[in-house]
């Protein structure tokens, strides 16, 4: 889970909202520390920059340091339950900083984090399963 969540450049391949990712700074291990995202919120395209800290392989935290969003703070925590089973817990708080109609804001707040977590789960399961096996008939 940790390796996949830190693979920022792959996000546009599995996250439906993420259009572009650019790692602006890396640490000595090669992990992204400052990352720029461009996402499609359906009613508006936005850009934000997150600064990351981590404790490999159990925790990833982030906070916004620039872009169109007033503030973003969040974290993933991973707890290994077995050889192929990990519990992942995500929390995130977002202050958009721009006007969005009430019903759309509530829908976005309710669904955005849930959707991103479900897409992350699908990507982890896909990578763990590996490429589909080919059988001959």
Image (cartoon, rainbow, N blue to C red):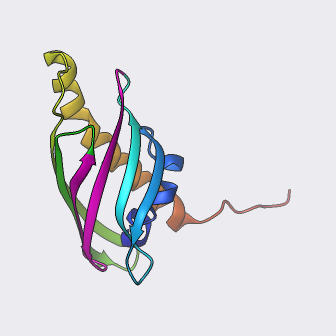
Name the quadrant of the C terminus: bottom right
**Residue 82: % across, % down:** 33, 78
Dominant secondary structure (helix, strand or loop) of the stretch shown in magenta: strand
Residue at left offset 46%, top offset 64%:
7
Single out the residue that lies furthest toward the bottom: 28
**Residue 109: % across, % down:** 19, 33
Single out the residue that lies furthest toward the right: 137
Tally of marks: 0
Look at the picture and state if 103 lies above or below 83: above
Quarter of the image where one finds residue 81: bottom left
- Give whichever of 52, 88 is nearer the camera: 52
Residue at left offset 25%, top offset 34%:
111
**Left or right of 99 in this view: 134:** right
Name the quadrant of the N terminus: bottom left
- Give the magenta-colored segment's residue range: 43-66
Any magenta on residue 52?
yes
- Give whichever of 110, 42 is nearer the camera: 42
Look at the picture and state if 71 lies above or below 86: above
**Residue 66: % across, % down:** 26, 49
Any magenta on residue 101?
no
Look at the picture and state if 83 lies above or below 44: below
- Give whichever of 126, 62 is nearer the camera: 62
**Left or right of 33 in this view: 64:** left
Residue at left offset 36%, top offset 71%:
2
């Amino acid at each position: 889970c940790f390796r996949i969540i830190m693979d920022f450049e792959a996000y546009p391949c599995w996250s439906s909202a993420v259009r572009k990712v650019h790692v602006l700074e890396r640490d000595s291990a090669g992990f992204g520390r400052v990352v720029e995202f461009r996402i499609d919120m359906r009613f508006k395209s936005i850009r934000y920059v997150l600064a990351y800290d981590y404790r490999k392989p159990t925790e990833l935290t982030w906070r916004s340091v620039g872009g169109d969003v007033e503030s973003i703070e969040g974290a993933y925590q991973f707890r290994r339950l077995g050889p192929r089973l990990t519990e992942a817990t995500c929390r995130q708080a977002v202050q958009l900083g721009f006007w969005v109609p009430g019903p759309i804001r509530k829908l976005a707040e309710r669904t955005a984090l849930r959707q991103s977590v479900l897409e992350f789960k699908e990507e982890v399961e896909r990578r763990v399963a590996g490429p589909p096996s080919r059988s001959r008939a």
